[in-house]
Image: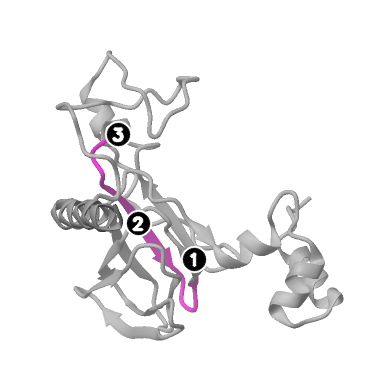
Amino acid sequence: MAVANSAVMYRMMATLAVVMLRSRVFADPDLLQDICVADLTSAVKLNGYPCKSNVTAEDFFFAGLAKAGATNTSTGSIVTGANVQKIPGLNTLGVSLARVDYAPGGINPPHTHPRATEVVFMLEGELDVGFITTANVLISKSIKKGDVFVFPKGLVHFQKNNGESPATVIAAFNSQLPGTQSIAATLFAATPPVPDNVLTKAFQVGTKQVEKIKSKFAPKK
């Protein structure tokens, strides 16, 4: 009986290995029809958006990346997304874009995209960019106009304009809605807040330092 059970287990493991080797990896579920334009007004909740029936060319169009965004922010950068929430026709297609503009000295702070790999194309200026692996290894490079750099899915990454001129990149994602978690804002501006004793232990600082950082992220009145 033990031998028979071992044989069955072996076959199950072998079958699972073959399935895993043959499977394809997608950031988003694969498309099952020609189009599925997102109904952004629907109250139905699912993994994506339900399809609407009254489709027009405007559902596949967005002019928002043509002009630079205002970089007079606390970080000196601004992200203009071109995802499914701006282009409903991207629903189920597994791609999206963004434009990021940086003032001199501006930074796109350390953040992650939990649902997508990101590829940036340098339109103007120069940036110092990098990501950190799960082994805490920093992979970084200075990039200039015409260069391309890749940030792997889910890994913490950043971009910094150390030049004296504005900089701009176009970012592409293999997800219709890649999501963004800014590390500092996620930890210090969560609602309800992350307990101070968690943050003091994690960052090895005192409560006063944690409260000071939290105050920087408090909504402006």
Q: Quadrant of residue 137?
A: bottom left
The foreground one among 138 and 128 is: 138
Q: Residue furthest top?
A: 54
**Callout 3 amino acid:** Asn
Going from N to C along the chain, the mark reached first, 2 or 3, is: 3
The amino acid pointed to by label 1 is His
Q: Which residue is mark 2?
A: 99
Look at 35% across and 57% down and name the residue there. 99
Type of amino acid under label 2: Arg
- In magenta segment, residue 94: yes
- Badge 1: few (under 14), some or many (20 or more) residues near its Cα, within 10 Å? many
Q: How many marks?
A: 3
Taking depth in this image into account, of 207 and 141 the one nearest to the observer is 207
Q: Residue at x 46, y 83 (%)?
A: 136
Residue 219: x, y in percent?
Answer: 73, 53
Would you say 127 lies left or right of 17 here?
right
State whether residue 203 is above or below residue 72. Answer: below
Span shown in magenta: 91-107
- The residue singled out by tag 1 in the image is 111
In this view of the protein, which residue sits in the foreground, 105 or 15? 15
Say which of marks 1 and 2 sits in front. 1
In the picture, the disc for residue 221 is: none
Q: Position of residue 198 (x, y in %)?
A: 75, 68
The residue identified by callout 3 is: 91
